[in-house]
Each structure stands twice: as structure tokens, then as C-alpha cells.
Image (spheres, rainbow, N blue to C red):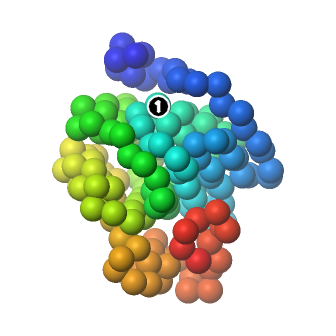
Amino acid sequence: MLILLSLGLWKFTEKIEAKFVGVYMKTARFEFKIDKAANCIFVRHFGLVDLASILDRGSAIFNHADYQSGLNRITDFTGVETKLSSEDIRLITDKISLRKTESGNYREAVIVDNLLGYGLVRIFNSLSSLNENEYEIFSTEDGDVSFKVKNWLNLDSSFLFPGFLSVK
């Protein structure tokens, strides 16, 4: 697996049963929507979040027909169980660095609902300090996450998030 990652190749770690509806994709472990008009990819994880689910989600988005460079991201990790080691997070940041040319620069708002999620994203931020993307953590405990995320990503205040996100 490490060799595949270092070569920039993706390996699907499980059979993904996907449902495509327009620019939506939903599996048992994640759902996403690409909204080019909003310049954003909206992502929600379900159940167990581990290295496999993160890599599978990244590959599904990157290989989606509507994917384009420079799209901002909102990633919702609320209500999940997290099983990521610091080494897993390092592998994820290495993968992002390898895909820099294809991904372009973007901002990613990460929504969490517990201290473990917050801490893991902080580790990710510290390991990602050399890449040019910007990451911001938003905790559901801090109140009006919707307003803060919209403001940070320069989305209109009347913008409606996809229904699968925990923020409305």
C-alpha cells in the first residue's frame, strides 16, 4: 500500500457500492456533491473514518467527471467514529502533496463535533503546513457553523448547503 501511495496510485480498499445522482455520489462510508457554480465540493463521512475511507473518497472525487482543479471543500466529520493514526494522517498529507498539480489551490472547511476530530485535524494542519492550501476547523460546539463556513469560503449568505451535511 505504501508503495502505491508513493507512486501516486490509488488502491480501492473495498468494493464501493456507489449511487450517482447528477453530480452527487453516495457510498456506505461517504457522500459528496460537486457544485462548480459554488466552486465547492461538499463531503460527508459516515460510520468509521479510517485511512481506507479517506483514500477511497479522495479517489472517487478526483476521478469524478465533474471534478476540476481549485474547487474549495467542505468536509463534514460529525457523528463519525475515527480510527486514524498520526502515520495515517502523514500518508494523507503526502498524497495531497503528490496531487498538488492536479488539485490546484483550494480552501477546505472541516466540520467536527468532538475533541478527537479537532485534534486529528490539527495534526493534519501541522503536517500540511508546506502545501499552499488553507484548512480551517469548525466545531459544531462553537455555534452558527453555517454562517462561519459560508463567510470563510466566500459563499453567499443565502447559499443552501446540500441536505446531507450537518450544517444547514
In the image, is residue 39 above or below residue 68? below
Residue 28 makes an appearance in the image: yes
- State the residue at coordinates (42%, 37%): 50
- State the residue at coordinates (39%, 63%): 112
* Residue that badge 1 annotates: 52
- Name the quadrant containing residue 144: bottom left
Residue 101 makes an appearance in the image: no
- Name the quadrant containing residue 44: bottom right
- State the residue at coordinates (60%, 37%): 60
- Name the quadrant containing residue 116: bottom left
- Relative to 150, 137 lies left or right: left
In the image, is residue 61 above or below residue 37? above
- Relative to 16, 8 lies left or right: left
Toward the top, the furthest residue is 3
Quarter in which the N terminus is drawn = top left
Of helix, strand and loop, which one carries label 1?
helix
- Relative to 7, 62 lies left or right: right
Residue 57 position within the rendered picture, expressed as x and y whole percent measured from the top left: 54, 40
Look at label 1 and name its amino acid. Ala
- Relative to 114, 70 lies left or right: right
Residue 84 position within the rendered picture, expressed as x and y whole percent measured from the top left: 33, 39
